[in-house]
Amino acid sequence: MRGMDLDLAQVRAFVATTEHRHFRHAAEELSITQQALSKRIARLEEALGERLLERDGRGGRGVELTAAGERFLEPARALLSAGEAAVTAVRGTVRPLRLDVWGHLFAPLRTVRQVLDAQTPSAVEIGHGRDLPSVAGALLRGEVDAGFGRYHALGDRRDQELAHRLVRLEPVDVILGPGHPLAGADALRPAELRGGRLLLPAALERLDFLQRFAERFELGAALVPEANLGAEHFLAQLREHPDAFALLPADVPLPEGTTPAGLRAVPLVDPTPLYAWSLSWPRHAAHPAVAALLRGFAEVGRRNRWLEYRPERDWLPEAERAELTDLTDLR
């Protein structure tokens, strides 16, 4: 093995495939064909003299790591990070922090913008991830440096490889159409929503917060539009389905024209659900600007009481309640 030169494109193909556990999805992310992806991995396996991946045997494009693949994964990720660090060192400058946000219906950038406007850190480039799993994969492949959105346990090795910090708790409102029987209320308890249909922007299993909320307050049926074409299209479903309701963080601005059309944002109380926003980053390869960004969130958060939580008044999923015990210095 002495003197072996590994091809970073082949290593990147392997890492992307392990993140997605699917050839087609990995190929789409790398903007190459499945055939090209397979060739890169085959050449890497030939160079190493070990098989790294096995098809899952279910007739699709799913894959599983072999024992050798498990051993190679962490060094492979470190190799990709080292390659990028080498390029940065040669250029002699610290590149901008690449920050991906997700949960776009909940407008994550309005929180990030408050922090960036309040400080002058190194340059930040904003990108948009589809969801937490896609951003987590990009973080571990070194394609982005930090992510902002709602973090929840992923149930695999990524939970150990990513660090995250809760930076904001935001009250959640219920959004009602003009024909909803509760549309005239000044405030509502979550229990009063039973019997209605929760409007979802995607399948419930992809929406951890809404899934926890539905379980805790015993909501039944849900309504999922055929396509998610943005906030205005999403909320238009509330006018078409009078028994439906949506949940949004309280400070999310409703699209222009929705209030005159009769939609109402009604506070939830007794208890008030809180939506948790977190910053996440690779645990062993943090960009130098991550620390400054965390300080910015802490400073703006203290001024705006972003981490205020009262157990007798508010509701949080259990994981976020536990995380608050480590954040007393940020309140």
Image: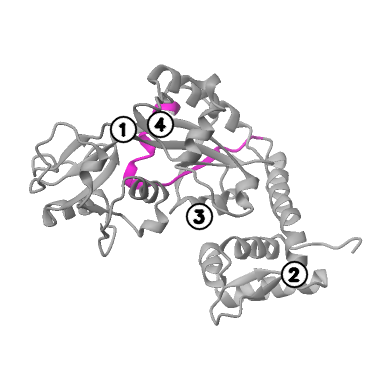
Q: CA distance from mark 4 to mark 1?
A: 11 Å
- State whether residue 227 is above or below residue 208: below
Which one is earlier in the sequence, the residue at label 3 or at label 4?
3
The residue stretch that appears in magenta: 93-115
Badge 3: few (under 14), some or many (20 or more) residues near its Cα, within 10 Å? some
Q: Which mark is residue 44?
A: 2
Q: How many marks?
A: 4
| Residue 68 image offset from top left, x and y in percent | 78, 66
Q: Amino acid at mark 4?
A: Leu
Q: Which residue is mark 1?
A: 272
Q: Alpha-carbon distance for marks 1 and 3?
A: 30 Å
Mark 3 sits on what residue? 134
Q: Could you tell which of marks 4 and 1 lies nearer the N-terminus?
A: 4
Marks 3, 2: nearer the viewer: 3
Dot label at residue 169: 4
Left or right of 242? Residue 41 is right
